[in-house]
Image (tube, helix red, strand yellow):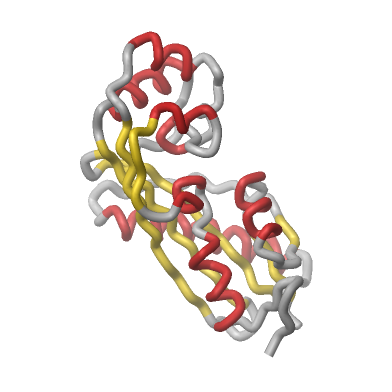
Amino acid sequence: MSELVLASQSPRRIQLLEKAGFSFTSIPINTSELIDENLHPDTQILSITRQKLEAATIWLKGLSKEDSTVIVADTEVLFRGRHLGKPQNKEHSREIIRRLSGNAHFVKTAVIIKNLKTLKEVSHIESSLVQFRLLTDREVDDYVNTDEGMDKAGAYGIQGLGQRLVAFQRGSMNNIIGFPIETIAPILKNEFNFATSNTTSK
């Protein structure tokens, strides 16, 4: 049986995959995540995700784990068609939140699942819409000073204090968090025959 590997050490992704009942190993993946602004946003995010897949493949083959099924994902926040990325510092974080204040933006997560032995691959892009409230300067500063959004695309985390910034959202909440498990779980079960703790494999 192929070993399931999550190429991420994001606590949020690990928790969601564990909660879905899958047994897996997580590995760290560091890539440059270079964005080609000339590409369509969906193509851009898939390109970043494929960079992560290539890095994970090299890592696993180096450990002689070619019989692995690897999950890679990348979440991006798009505002008016442009990637906002992660804040570089507090001032950049403040600038991002001010831009999102009173406006809607999209959160997109690209996921690629690949069996390194059979080369079977499934890719998917999930999209959700988030509408921010019109925030005061005080609200922006108070949130930025929590440092919650410093490691997150769009400079906020909807699963934490960042929910106070949001007027409403449409689409998968888990996607906004960074891992659309509602879509990923059926792919793992039906396409790759992975069982959860509550089911048996085919």
Q: Position of residue 104 (x, y in %)?
A: 26, 38
Location of residue 87 with respect to 114 vertically, above or below: above
Residue reaching furthest top?
138
Q: In the figure, is residue 45 to the left or right of 54?
A: left
Q: Quadrant of residue 40?
A: bottom left
Location of residue 165 with respect to 135 vertically, above or below: below
Q: Which residue does the image show at 25% across and 27% down from the upper left?
A: 102
Q: Quadrant of residue 92?
A: top left
Q: In the figure, is residue 162 to the left or right of 136?
A: right
Q: Position of residue 191 (x, y in %)?
A: 55, 83
The quadrant the N terminus occupies is bottom right
Q: Which residue does the image show at 48% across and 37% down from the upper left?
A: 158
Residue in the foreground of this view, choosing between 64 and 178: 178
Location of residue 83 with respect to 141 vertically, above or below: below
Task: Evaluate whether residue 44 shows in this view.
Answer: yes
Q: Which residue does the image show at 70% across and 77% down from the upper left?
A: 195
Q: Position of residue 44 (x, y in %)?
A: 34, 54
